[in-house]
Amino acid sequence: MLSVTSREALLSLARERIRSSISGDDPSYPPRTHDLEAKAGAFVTLTNPHRYPNLRGCIGRVEAREPIYDTVHYAAYQSAFCDPRFDPIQPDELPSVLIEISLLLPPRAIEGAEQIEVGTHGIIVRSETHRGILLPQVATERNWSRDEFLAAACKKAGLHPDAWASESVRLFVFEAEVFDESGERI
């Protein structure tokens, strides 16, 4: 669990990364604190309540390959400008964009779908050539059942909606600390 100060620093980092990329100005990043040097996976989700659909980008890294600070720095840029599902964030849109960060605990393999706790777990559906990831809050936001959550992860992976039941598909779960610019922990 990060302190309020560290969560605010990450949100500021993400917004400044996007702002400075749009403006071309030198960025003014918050300082790197000790707890932000810990390695963790993270996703940055961008939404705009004035657009439909309101999701504007969501990219991150599941694996804890680098410090949280660096992962959020990378994911903020990728979410704003490189998510292939959306047009890049435009300068006039940035004030309306809400930033949400999900810090991921390491994923763990599970034996069966009955081990998934909707609202607590994010899921990864993985076959030899495909992978679909959904953050824990996605099922809650959409009021999905476990089966609907699994079907959506399979579709995201490019698999048949019930491929999760196949022996060739592996299931993983993870938990996340989720917070956004509203100051609420999700």
Image (cartoon, helix red, strand yellow):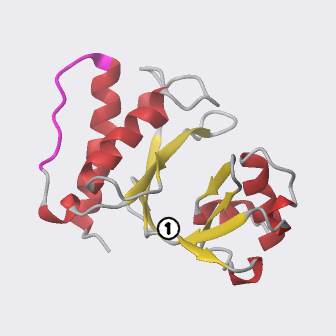
In the image, taking residue 36 as reference, residue 49 lies left or right, namely: right
Q: Is residue 116 above or below residue 183?
A: below
In the image, taking residue 100 as reference, residue 162 lies left or right, namely: right
Q: Residue furthest bottom?
A: 115
Instruction: Tell me the element at label 1.
Output: loop
Q: Residues within 10 Å of mark 1 (few under 14, many from 20)?
A: few
Q: Residue 65: give x, y in percent of width and height.
A: 34, 54
- Identify residue for label 1: 186
Residue 34 figure quarter: bottom left
In the image, taking residue 37 as reference, residue 68 lies left or right, namely: right
Q: Residue at x 50, y 43 (%)?
A: 59
Q: Which residues are magenta?
A: 23-31
Q: Residue at x 46, y 44 (%)?
A: 98
Question: Is residue 25 in the magenta section?
Answer: yes
- Out of 167 and 63, give the one closest to the viewer: 167
Residue 142 figure quarter: bottom right
Q: Residue 5: give x, y in percent of width and height.
A: 21, 63
Residue 182 seen anywhere in this rendered image of the structure: no
Q: Is residue 58 above or below residue 93?
A: below
Q: Residue 150: give x, y in percent of width and height.
A: 77, 64
